[in-house]
Amino acid sequence: MGDEIWLEYVRRQERFEAHRKTHTVPLIYDEDMRHENPTVWPRFEALEPSIQPFMDLIREANSDRVTPGRDPYFIRAILTMLAPKSAILPHRDKGYSLFRSHRYHIALKTNEKVDFGINQKVQHFAAGEIWEINNRAFHAVRNMSDEPRTHLILDYVVPGEQIDDPDAGRITA
């Protein structure tokens, strides 16, 4: 895709302090962080054949949570790159939709000098692995390498599902 795609969209790193050292390519994304009717960006179509297998695995992993007549959907899909020798500082994602979706990270380009911490537990996400993280918990990333780290992030909504929130107890997706 070329390096220039990482410079086309800058609003996410400008808007969110935690993401200042990242670059983002929106694929399914809305700046208002809506919870329904997501905007599919033109670049998604070009990448969909590569992303679809991950989406299918996520759908299958959540199939037992689906209420008949209420179709699950991907509300967000972004590519994100963390610069070399940088970090995403500890933070919790906030907002109606972020609290009511499953956040999946797919490591695309990484190395063993990159780690992901969630509630003070540190984990390396190897390339090709899919990890569901609790973005309502404190999380952070350190890239101590000389190479950028690239992830595909997919947010998946299962309408009607009950989700545990650390501040509000049980909430409905």
Image (cartoon, rainbow, N blue to C red):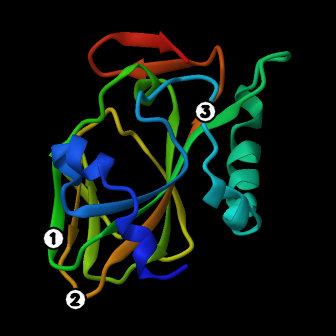
**Picture quarter containing residue 50?**
bottom right
- Give the image quarter of residue 22: bottom left
Residue 163 in percent (x, y) is at 49, 21
Please tell me how crowded label 1 is: few (under 14), some (14-19), or many (20+) other residues with Cα within 10 Å: some
User: Label 3: how many residues lie within 10 Å, few (<14), some (14-19) or many (20+)?
Assistant: some
- Labelled pair 3, 2 in contact (Cβ < 8 Å): no
Marker disc for residue 146: 2
- How crowded is the residue under tag 2: few (<14 C-alpha within 10 Å), some, or many (20+)? few
- Residue at mark 3: 38
Tag 1: residue type?
Ser
Q: Is residue 168 above or below residue 103?
A: above
Q: Which residue is mark 1?
A: 86
Sequence-first disc among 3 and 2: 3
Foreground tag (3 vs 2):
3
Mark 3 residue element: loop
Please give the name of the residue rendered at 53% of the width and 23% of the height, measured from the top-left corner: 35
Q: Is residue 96 visible?
A: yes
Marks 1 and 3, Cα distance to the nearest angstrom? 30 Å
Amino acid type, residue under disc 3 in the picture: Pro
